[in-house]
Amino acid sequence: MDYLAALFAPTVMAIAFTCLIVTIVRSQGGANKYKEDAAVDAALAAASAKPAAPAESERGGATRSAD
């Protein structure tokens, strides 16, 4: 009976992985594809609409002189 206990977890994981792959494949294309494409396009448009941050603010403030 130890072999059943040893094979149970890998079997459950294999079944779960197969279900995950089937779900991913089924969700590609169709109406979902257009929804995902629209969401990506909206995110890219929002990211390109933001103004670029100045380089000094990334370094933490004012620049130091070389004196």
Image (cartoon, helix red, strand yellow):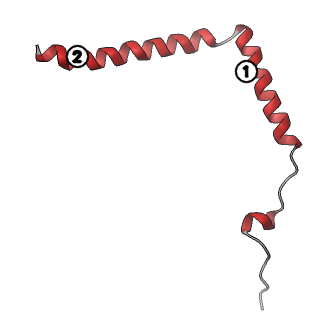
Q: Of 8 and 65, which appears nearest the observer?
A: 8
Q: Secondary structure at mark 1?
A: helix
In the displayed structure, would residue 28 be above or below residue 50? above
Q: Dividing the picture into quarters, in which one does residue 55 lie?
A: bottom right
Asked if residue 37 lies left or right of residue 23, the reply is: right
Q: Residues within 10 Å of mark 2 (few under 14, many from 20)?
A: few
CB atoms at circles 1 and 2 under 8 Å apart? no
Q: Position of residue 34 (x, y in %)?
A: 77, 15
Question: Residue extending furthest bottom?
Answer: 67
Q: Secondary structure at mark 2?
A: helix
Q: Dividing the picture into quarters, in which one does residue 65 lie?
A: bottom right
Q: Residues within 10 Å of mark 1 (few under 14, many from 20)?
A: few
Marks 1/2: CA–CA distance:
38 Å
Residue identified by numbered label 1 = 36
Asked if residue 17 lies left or right of residue 36, the reply is: left
In the displayed structure, would residue 2 be above or below residue 40? above
Residue type of the residue flagged with mark 2: Leu
Residue type of the residue flagged with mark 1: Glu
Q: Residue at x 73, y 69 (%)?
A: 60
Tell me the quarter of the image containing the C terminus: bottom right
Asked if residue 17 lies left or right of residue 53, the reply is: left
In the displayed structure, would residue 43 be above or below residue 26? below
Q: Position of residue 47 (x, y in %)?
A: 81, 41
Q: Residue at x 62, y 12 (%)?
A: 27
Residue identified by numbered label 2 = 7
